[in-house]
Image (cartoon, helix red, strand yellow):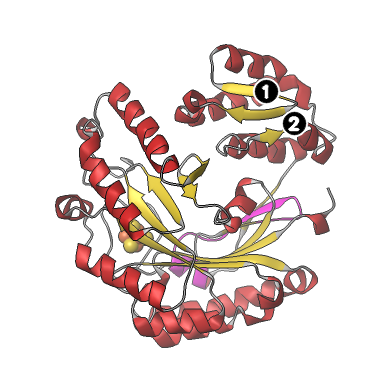
């Protein structure tokens, strides 16, 4: 596949949050004024570094993630958005993540007027006890008010993030959140499971419920949302027709993207770049870790991320894209997965079954083992 045929996304990591939630693993800092100003200057410098590539290629999607971009002041948000204007002629989707506690009408006006097309808001839960456990300061009222402002500002493509209720054995508790989110009727819903990686996180592993109950809860959630008009297009993502997140699809399909800001990664021209993690390192050093991507690595990543999507992977197209990889070496693996009811292979299209999607991380490990053995 020629490089020009790959679509190019632009990701900007805004590493600031007014409130640092206990469970969060993203890189973030409190928005101290001097740090934010240094950040904005450095983003300019990074854009200069990528200038040649960005002037030769059309950026098709932009994503401001974090952190919480809405923790920037109105003026700083305006400055950051202004830097994106040269790319606008070809941009089909521009997402900005916001938090219910820091977004306001004025900031939404800036985003709308700058050309932002999609807002993603971190709701996580409508239940006060869960929010408090997560260390989130927001209230239900703030969520409803923010949602109303987003709609009134003219956005017709909204994602709401939810975190699975910690007590997954009781579907009714989680269903309360699902019902509430449906009442708001966003175009897109993302559901996440809490990570226990941080020892100081709010939920200890003993809070995890019986595995079978959890499995049932996932399956019921998928059905529940599907019956209400949301297509389950990726393991954690649901969208109404025409509202899948194009930026994320671009990443999962291992196309190309430029990442700006601390901890951001880029993938371009068969190379992967990793920015310094902390803002201090990112500000003080030019060092970006860079790794060459062999066809084998890219092909493996296409399989691992492709299996997370309901549409799966066309094995013929994969072989054409990576002619130096023997895609047929995976056939015994697909046959075993098929026998176990984890995948289907029809007309060379590999897709996960529900059972496979539930253990998609384990399938990824088996794919990696297969690469290592060959
Ligand atoms: S607002 Fe989001 S990014 Fe910031 S600390 Fe909380 S979960 Fe993490």
Report the mark closest to the observer, 1 or 2. 1
SS for dot 1: strand
Specify whether 140 is left or right of 219.
Answer: left
Q: Is mark 2 within 8 Å of ligand 1?
A: no
Q: Please tell me which of labels 1 and 2 falls first in the chain.
A: 2
Find the distance from the CA under tag 1 to the CA under tag 2: 9 Å
Mark 1, residue position: 345
Where is 137 relative to 148, above or below?
Answer: above
Is 225 in the magenta? no
Where is 274 relative to 149, above or below?
Answer: above
Taking the spot 54% from the left edge, 82% from the top edge, the residue there is 114
For ligand 1, give the image quadrant.
bottom left
The front one of 181 and 5 is: 181
Is 280 in the magenta? yes
**In terms of image quadrants, where is residue 121?**
bottom left
The answer to whether residue 332 shows anywhere in this view is yes
**In terms of image quadrants, where is residue 349?**
top right
| Dot 2 alpha-carbon crowd within 10 angstroms: few under 14, some 14 to 19, many 20 or more | some
Specify whether 229 is left or right of 142.
Answer: right
Bounds of the magenta segment:
267-283
Specify whether 248 is left or right of 329.
Answer: left
The spot of residue 242 in percent (x, y) is: 58, 55
The spot of residue 210 in percent (x, y) is: 26, 24
SS for dot 2: helix
């Amino acid at each position: 596949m020629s490089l020009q045929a790959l679509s190019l996304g632009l990701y900007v990591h805004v590493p600031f949050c007014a409130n640092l939630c206990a469970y969060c693993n993203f890189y973030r800092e409190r928005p101290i004024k001097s740090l934010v100003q240094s950040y904005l200057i450095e983003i300019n410098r990074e854009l200069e570094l990528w200038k040649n590539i960005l002037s030769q290629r059309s950026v098709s999607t932009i994503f401001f993630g974090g952190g919480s971009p809405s923790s920037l002041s109105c003026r700083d948000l305006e400055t950051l958005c202004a830097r994106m204007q040269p790319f606008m002629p070809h941009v089909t989707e521009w997402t900005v993540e916001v938090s219910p506690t820091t977004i306001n009408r004025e900031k939404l006006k800036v985003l709308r007027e700058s050309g932002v097309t999609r807002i993603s808001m971190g709701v996580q839960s409508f239940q006060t006890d869960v929010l408090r456990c997560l260390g989130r300061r927001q209230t239900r009222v703030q969520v409803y008010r923010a949602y109303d402002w987003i709609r009134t500002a003219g956005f017709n493509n909204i994602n709401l993030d939810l975190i699975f209720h910690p007590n997954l054995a009781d579907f009714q508790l989680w269903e309360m959140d699902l019902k509430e989110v449906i009442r708001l009727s966003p175009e897109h819903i993302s559901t996440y499971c809490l990570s226990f990686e941080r020892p100081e996180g709010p939920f200890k592993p003993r809070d995890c419920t019986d595995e079978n109950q959890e499995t049932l809860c996932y399956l019921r959630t998928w059905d529940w949302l599907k019956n209400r008009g949301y297509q389950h297009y990726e393991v954690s993502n649901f969208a109404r027709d025409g509202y899948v997140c194009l930026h994320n699809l671009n990443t999962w399909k291992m196309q190309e993207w430029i990442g700006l800001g601390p901890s951001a990664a880029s993938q371009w021209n068969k190379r992967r770049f990793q920015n310094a993690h902390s803002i201090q390192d990112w500000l003080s050093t030019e060092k970006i870790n860079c790794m060459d991507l062999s066809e084998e690595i890219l092909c493996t990543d296409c399989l691992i991320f492709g299996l997370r999507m309901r549409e799966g992977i066309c094995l013929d197209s994969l072989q054409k894209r990576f002619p130096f990889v023997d895609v047929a070496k995976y056939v015994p693996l697909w046959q075993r997965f098929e026998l176990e009811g984890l995948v289907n292979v029809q007309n060379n299209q590999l897709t996960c079954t529900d059972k496979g999607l539930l253990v998609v991380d384990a399938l990824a490990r088996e794919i990696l083992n297969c690469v290592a053995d060959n």
